[in-house]
Image (tube, grey):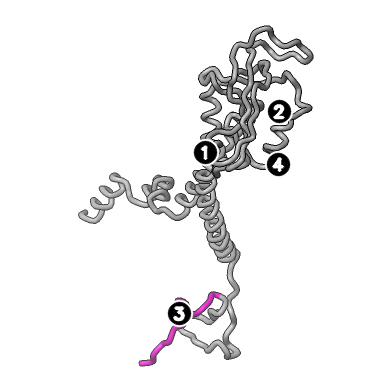
Amino acid sequence: MSTISRSRPSLTPATSERSTLPMGGSAAPGSPEFKPLEPTREQLLAHFFERFKFYTSLCLGTAAILAVFAFLFLIPFVVEPAVQTILAEFVPEAGLCSVSEHVHAETLTNCTWASCREGCTTAHTKCHKIRVNLSRRPFVEGAPPPAKWDETHLKFLINPEGCGYPPTVNCSVFAKEYAGPNAPKLFPCYYSLTRPDLVVARYSWEETVRGLIIALVLPTSVFVFSLSVLAYWHCRCCDRACNRRVHAESFASKEESYLKYSMETA
């Protein structure tokens, strides 16, 4: 009784090395009878999709991690200052202000507050402290000073946070602009309705809301999108939930099972 040897494709290292010999035949990879089998179009597409899926998953995972760190970074620098600015309820129309006092202080004990700080997370040993008189009437260029001020000796900050980073915030230029020898006697300012002792030089409701929306929506959208795609590709529970109908059609219905049972018992 002759023994028939069969080629075992599952043990070959690659699809392109499988032979095209008929069933029952065998040949060594170096023999003339061995003809390599070229991969089909479906196999090439499947290979390309697997590589695309791997590299895309790697990029999406990196993007999700960076989105989390970006959101945590934006909370103290954008989100929290924007929320405090909105809660302060600054008036949209500028009032009228005039400098009542300007002090260039030094040491930490004298700089417990400052009109301007270059950097929002560090303590400063030198600072400018400016106080102003406030009139709530709308600012008009060239208008005479009021006979009586509504509020006096209020803290004057460069913006609602009182700090920032170069080149947007330059404290030396700010001090010269409002309290220097050539500074105007009257200038526009914005006062808070919930914090009567706070007056700022720069305020924009549109920029505040725009920055808050971008800081909240952009990292969250990137994180949710990346996580959703990764879960759809790699989570079996999500795959079954999204393809529930396909899994259900793979099982026979009750009528088909009953008919099959009747035919077998007949």
Locate residue 38 relative to residue 241 in the image: left or right. Answer: right
Label 1 vs label 3: CA separation? 79 Å
- Please name the amino acid that badge 2 sits on: Ala
- Please name the amino acid that badge 3 sits on: Leu
Q: Determine contact: label 1, label 3, CB under 8 Å.
A: no
* Residue at the image point whose x is 58% and y is 21% from the top: 154
First in residue order: circle 4 vs circle 3: 3
Which secondary structure lies at badge 3? helix
Of 54 and 190, the residue lying toward us = 190
- Please name the amino acid that badge 4 sits on: Pro
First in residue order: circle 1 vs circle 3: 3
Q: Based on the displayed image, in which of its 4 quarters is residue 163 positioned? A: top right
First in residue order: circle 2 vs circle 3: 3
Residue beneath disc 3: 11
| Quarter of the rendering occupied by the C terminus | bottom left
Toward the top, the furthest residue is 147
Label 4 vs label 3: CA separation? 66 Å
Label number found at residue 167: 4
Which secondary structure lies at badge 1? helix
The answer, for residue 221, to whether it is visible in the render is no
Closer to viewer: mark 1 or mark 2: 1
